[in-house]
Image: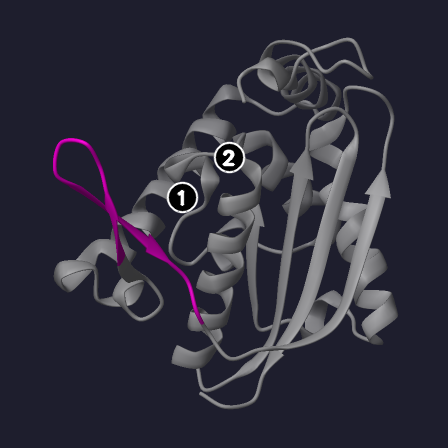
Amino acid sequence: MLDSFVRDPWAGAGMLDAAEAVAAEMGATREELDDLTALRWAQYAAGLAEDRAFQRRYQVPVELPQRKGTLTLATGEGVVRVLASGFARVAKSRMPQAPVPAALSALQTAGREITDVDAITTHNPFAVNDLYFARETGVKPEDMNAYGCSLVFGHPQGPTGLRSIAELIETLRLRGGGVGLFTGCAAGDTGAALVVEVTDP
């Protein structure tokens, strides 16, 4: 799992290098990135309130027997209609940029605009990813990831993406339904997105 952080075999540079490069190119300041990280932490903390009331809406305990006792994990569930998906590639080692064209592609396929979206979650493990997304789409950082994102709760990609989609569904359900956008990056140059609609809160 950590290999992609150190060196992406296709692009020849690690994800940390990609995040730093995009931050430098867009002129992101340390203060902006720190502020966004603090925002994501506060949003995540909201999901822990009242003994994890929000997370318990979609996470159910799963017990796995171990040699020494039992390991308890959680998984997600929800009611959702998938409107469209989108994928994009950008320049080598510019992975923080990739969620934007992926999201726009998915929205176009769904016949929607970014202004039609009621909730957004992202798998963006670096603050620069969400800052870049906000600048390119006009979405305010505080209007994304209402309960935190992988910047706070981490990887790996597959489970993190599914968790973010589950949180998107539950966020929409709490708001009475609507259209949601999930988007995220993958090591090197790739982004993916999903547009969903929740009609049964």
Rendered image quadrant of residue 186? top right
Quarter holding the N terminus is top right
Q: Residue at horizontal 14%, vertical 63%?
A: 50
As measured in the structure, the alpha-carbon distance from the residue carrying label 2 to the one carrying label 1 is: 18 Å
Taking depth in this image into account, of 136 and 21 the one nearest to the observer is 21
- Which residue is label 1 attached to? 40
Q: Amino acid at mark 1?
A: Arg
> Can residue 50 be seen in the rendering of this structure?
yes
Q: Residue at horizontal 62%, vertical 35%?
A: 129
Rendered image quadrant of residue 93? top right
Q: How far across and down, in percent of the image, does residue 153 sit?
A: 38, 39
Taking depth in this image into account, of 155 and 95 the one nearest to the observer is 155
Whether 31 is drawn above or below 77: the answer is above
- Which residue is label 2 attached to? 156
Whether 124 is drawn above or below 138: the answer is above
Q: How far across and down, in percent of the image, does residue 132 sit?
A: 67, 38
Residue 67 falls inside the magenta stretch: yes
Q: What's the mark number on residue 158? A: none
Quarter holding the C terminus is bottom left
What is the span of residues highlighted in magenta in the rendered image? 62-77
Q: Residue at horizontal 56%, vertical 89%?
A: 199
Specify whether 48 is left or right of 90.
left
Element type at marker 2? loop
